[in-house]
Image (cartoon, rainbow, N blue to C red):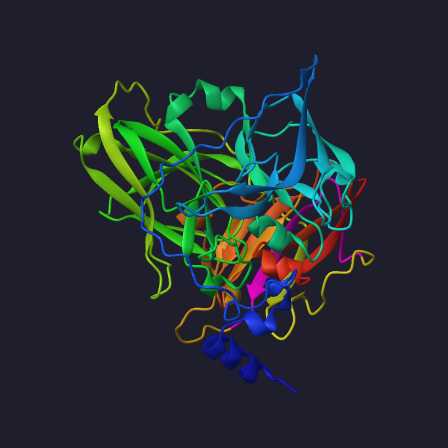
Amino acid sequence: MLNRRHVLKAAVVGGAAALFPWEGLSGSGSAAAAGDLAQTVPFAHALPVPRTLAPLTRGATTDVYEMRMREADVEIVKGLTSRVRTFDGTFPGPTIKACHGRAVEVRQYNDLTVNAAVHLHGGEVHSEHDGLPMDVIAPGGNRTYHYPNKQRAASLWYHDHAHHLEAENVYKGLHGLYLISDAEERRLPLPRGAFDVPLVIRDARVESDGTLRYTRPSDCPHMLVNGKERPYFKVAARKYRLRLYNACANRYIRLRLADGTPFTQIASDGGLLERPVQRDELLMLGGERVEVVVDFSRYAVGQSVVLENTGALPTERPEVLRFDIDRRSTDNSQVPARLSTLPPVPTGTVERDFELRTFPEMTINGVSYDPDRVDVATTVGSSEIWTIRNVEAPVAAPPDFHLYHSFHTHLTYFRVLERNGGPAGVQDAGLKDTVCLGPGETVKIAMTWGPYTGQYLYHCHQLGHSSGGQMGRIDVNPA
């Protein structure tokens, strides 16, 4: 029988693939059995910006959209065609731009051959519209999701959440952006329009015949931004607002500008921070969003600067995206010293503890997900403090992405109170719905449950982990 030492040794020496069978679903096989890796030249593609979806109808209070989940052929690596799973035929899916106080309805049609369940990550929605793992749309079916948009401005995203399938479905393309704006955000003189750009970052393995192979993250050396492998982006010598997403199924990334220029962070998962903060590097796990402002006026026209991933494996290239400064531009934008007022940090009256384990099974508090079992019962308005531990001990190089966890709560945002017994730092600033836990780390978070009742989830957003059952059910009952 495998004990902890043997399992960890297998993960470090041989990689995690043999321990995580869902990483080779649908007959994809292991990386070793796959074809040759596609050879790439960085910066062969221009960066695309995901298209904005137009509503079918606009009512007095609600915008109505329609999407079809279907397979499509796209160019990820220059000169190769890859078959992917998409929302509405694009990779990533189209962007929905919503406004606070104005509802959105999306009718999703499933033209795929697999089940799907669409979750609005970061959305405060009724339970029946949350995209729970068992609330699937079967092939040939459809479902309408209703999003009230009564929350503050934030960079959300939608993605598949079908049980045992979400990691593969998201990896193969079932994800897109959902941006909520509000009056507070619109009043600020931040960069906007063409100078407000989402960057959806994720890894991939594309083979020499174009196949997008679903496999372990250590065999996924291609880094994509907005669906293209290591593109370039022509920018003006002025300030840009960059909305950074980690859409990797199973990998953390550490982002920095190669010349050491700092980012000005203005927002986190749940929207604007109270004040901007300067950061030299951004550690992001699956599902996390960070919004930054970068002032390219410090560069001369004709210069370039590279966004790199210092968390890349030694066998991988660190480049993610190259910014090419190709013109001058008038710039009336600025980053105010004060951005927003956040709600008070909840004072918890209930305390709970959670342990996340990777080996030998994906568990929270020793159990895997059972949709019929209530793991936590709470009430609307209940303020709670949760202590979350990643009990996996750090191991020697090469790094194993599976030893990291990205703890995510549906329905509500939280505040990070402590990290490893000390105060939370800039990494944990603002309203969060995901929090990073490295091997052996402990965080303490505080949240108030609501505003809706029903069944919701908490889980690891390393999607290989949640696909394997590292999820819990929380029922929010009436007060």
Q: Hey, which quadrant is residue 6 in on the image?
A: bottom right
Using the image as rendered, state which of residue 263 and residue 34 is in the foreground.
34
Q: Is residue 144 above or below residue 27?
A: above
| Magenta span of residues | 374-392
Image coordinates of residue 140 in percent, x first then y, are 78, 40
Q: Is residue 5 left or right of residue 61?
A: left
Residue at the top extreme?
A: 60
Image coordinates of residue 379 in percent, x first then y, are 76, 44
The residue under the point 18% across, 37% down is 303
> Is the C terminus in the top left, top right, bottom left or bottom right quadrant?
top right
The residue under the point 54% across, 44% down is 432
Image coordinates of residue 182 in percent, x first then y, are 54, 22
The residue under the point 28% across, 20% down is 331
Image coordinates of residue 391 in percent, x first then y, are 56, 70
Tell me if residue 390 is in the magenta stretch: yes
Q: Is residue 194 above or below residue 320?
A: above
The reply to whether residue 411 is visible in this rendering is: no
Q: Main secondary structure of the magenta part?
A: strand
Q: Is residue 213 left or right of residue 325?
A: right
Residue at the bottom extreme?
A: 1
Q: Is residue 223 left or right of residue 235?
A: right
